[in-house]
Amino acid sequence: MDIHGLKNIAQRLMADDKGLLAMDESLATCNKRFKALGIPETEEFRRKYRQLIVTTPLLEESISGAILFDETVYQKTEDGVSFLSLLEHKGIIAGIKVDEGAVALAGFLGEKITEGLDGLRNRLEVYYSLGIRFAKWRAVIKIDEGIPTKACIKVNAVTLARYAALCQEVGLVPIIEPEVLMDGEHTLGKCEEVTSLVLKEVFNELYEQRVCLEGMILKPNMVVPSLECKVQNDVEAVAEATISCFLRVVPAAVGGVAFLSGGQPYELASKRLNMMHLRFGQLMPWPLTFSFSRAIQQPALDIWKGQDQNVKAAQEMLAFRASCNSAARRAAYKN
Ligand code: 13P
């Protein structure tokens, strides 16, 4: 394992107050978001949309890395320039989602396990040869009556660590995403309890499986009340719960922490990240940034609606939301 090379990639991803743009929606997820806006659910419209993103002027001022979906890796602009070379030209590091989605966990009603380990070593080698330098794997943990179970947390942690070890073997920095979902009515306190349990198990497995912490990035959920919880705690309470949880369970050696947005309103996600830096920036042993999909893309997608005449305005919105989150990393976000 080239520890020096992995550390270097992780450091570049976390440098200069930038963050990551997740644009790795699977076909099903991308089509679902298109459908809601009446955009044709075709490969050509997905190409057009991803072209809009990767050609956004000045995106590179706020974005250090972009996570792609396999289809996007091989796509080109109308002028025949591959998206990978466009990103490279902008100095944005290309990453790739390599999990194959979450499916029902046999024997555990309502819980899921993420698939994609079979043949993964070969797929990672191909991606590395194309110039991709990091990868992503998402596990989903749902809070509900009697769940998550210990078994669900354990198998997802084992799988995340297996994936991470394979990535590091070929020189890709693994982004490790154990997402505790916001769905339901649970409180902030419950989210904190479950997030702690999940992260403890994940880091235990990473240690057991000899994953180099300096050469990985954690992509966690913020510690938040669920979407339907009656008590919606203020921004400061969320920042405090999140950082105090992470200080207990995320080792200082980790290369970086980059949040998912998870369906939070996009301005609120920026405010919460901003507050973490404003109030607790001095306490953090790791760089802390964003790796948002919806909280950066959704307002731009709402403007685009699949129409060529809206591309420029959508790109301006995309660059603006990315810059808001970069500002939040400096505790300088003003909404
Ligand atoms: P959201 O920011 O929309 O939660 O997406 C992040 C992501 O990469 C999910 O895997």
Image (cartoon, grey):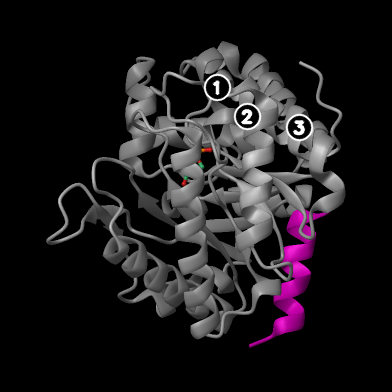
Asked if residue 58 can be seen in this view, the reply is: no
Q: How far across and how far down the image is residue 249, in percent?
A: 60, 62
**Residue drawn at the location 64% of the way across and 21% of the way down:** 267
> Which residue bears the numbered disc 2?
269
- Asked whether 100 or 229 is in front, the reply is 229
* Other residues around mark 3 within 10 Å, as few (<14) / some (14–19) / many (≥20): many
Camera-near label (2 vs 3) is: 3
- Cα separation, mark 1 vs mark 3, equals 15 Å
Q: Quadrant of the C terminus?
A: top right
Element class at badge 2: helix
Which residue sits furthest left? Answer: 107
Camera-near label (1 vs 3) is: 3
Asked if the residues shown at circle 1 and circle 2 are in contact, with their CB atoms under 8 angstroms apart, the answer is: yes
- 158 horizontally vs 58: left or right: left
Numbered disc total: 3
Q: Amino acid at mark 3?
A: Met
- Cα separation, mark 2 vs mark 3, equals 10 Å
Q: Is residue 204 above or below residue 133?
A: below
- 265 horizontally vs 13: left or right: left
Asked if the residues shown at circle 2 and circle 3 are in contact, with their CB atoms under 8 angstroms apart, the answer is: no
Q: Amino acid at mark 2?
A: Ala
Q: How far across and how far down the image is residue 269, in percent?
A: 62, 29
Q: Is residue 12 magenta?
A: yes
Q: Is residue 299 above or below residue 52?
A: above
Asked if residue 110 can be seen in this view, the reply is: yes
- Cα separation, mark 1 vs mark 2, equals 6 Å
> Which residue bears the numbered disc 1?
265
Q: How far across and how far down the image is residue 260, in percent?
A: 55, 42
Q: Is residue 39 above or below residue 95?
A: above
